[in-house]
Image: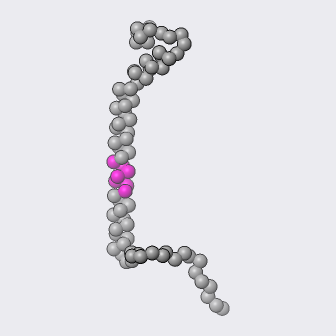
Amino acid sequence: MASRPSMKGKLKGKGGRKGPAAADEDATAAATAVRLVKEWTTWTMKTAKVAAHYGFIPFIIVVGMNSEPKPSIAQLLSPV
C-alpha cells in the first residue's frame, strides 16, 4: 500500500525555530504576556474604582438636572 502525503500544512518562511531552546523562549514570552495582562487588568480596575468613586455624585447631579421637572441643586443634594 502506498503512503499518502501528510495533510498537515508545512510552515514556510525564513528562520524557523527548532529545538528545545525555542520552547523555552515561547514559554518565557507567554509568561511575559500573562504578567502584562495581569498588570493592565489591575491598573484598569484601580482606575475604574477611582473614577466611579469621584464620578458618582456628579453623575447623579447631571442626570437629575436633565430630568423633567427640573429640580434645583438644593433639591438634588438634600436627602429628603
Left or right of 6? Residue 19 is left
Q: Is residue 51 above or below residue 44?
A: above
- Picture coordinates of residue 49 (x, y %)? 37, 33
| Along the line of sight, the residue nearer the viewer: 66 or 28 | 66
- Picture coordinates of residue 70 (x, y %)? 50, 11
Left or right of 67? Residue 76 is left
Residue 28 in view of the camera: yes
- Picture coordinates of residue 2 (x, y %)? 64, 90
Q: Is residue 46 above or below residue 23?
A: above
Q: Residue at x 38, y 45 (%)?
A: 41
| Along the line of sight, the residue nearer the viewer: 15 or 25 | 15
Q: Is residue 30 above or below residue 50?
A: below
Q: Which residues are magenta?
A: 33-39
Residue 79 in view of the camera: no
Q: Is residue 37 part of the magenta span, yes or no?
A: yes
Q: Residue at x 39, y 76 (%)?
A: 15
For the stretch drawn in magenta, the main secondary structure is helix
- Picture coordinates of residue 8 (x, y %)? 56, 76
Q: Is residue 19 part of the magenta span, yes or no?
A: no
The C terminus sits in image quarter: top left
- Which image quadrant is residue 61 in? top left
**Number of marks drawn:** 0
Q: Residue at x 48, y 76 (%)?
A: 12
Q: Which residue is at the far right? A: 1
Q: Which residue is at the far bottom? A: 1
Q: Is residue 46 above or below residue 32?
A: above
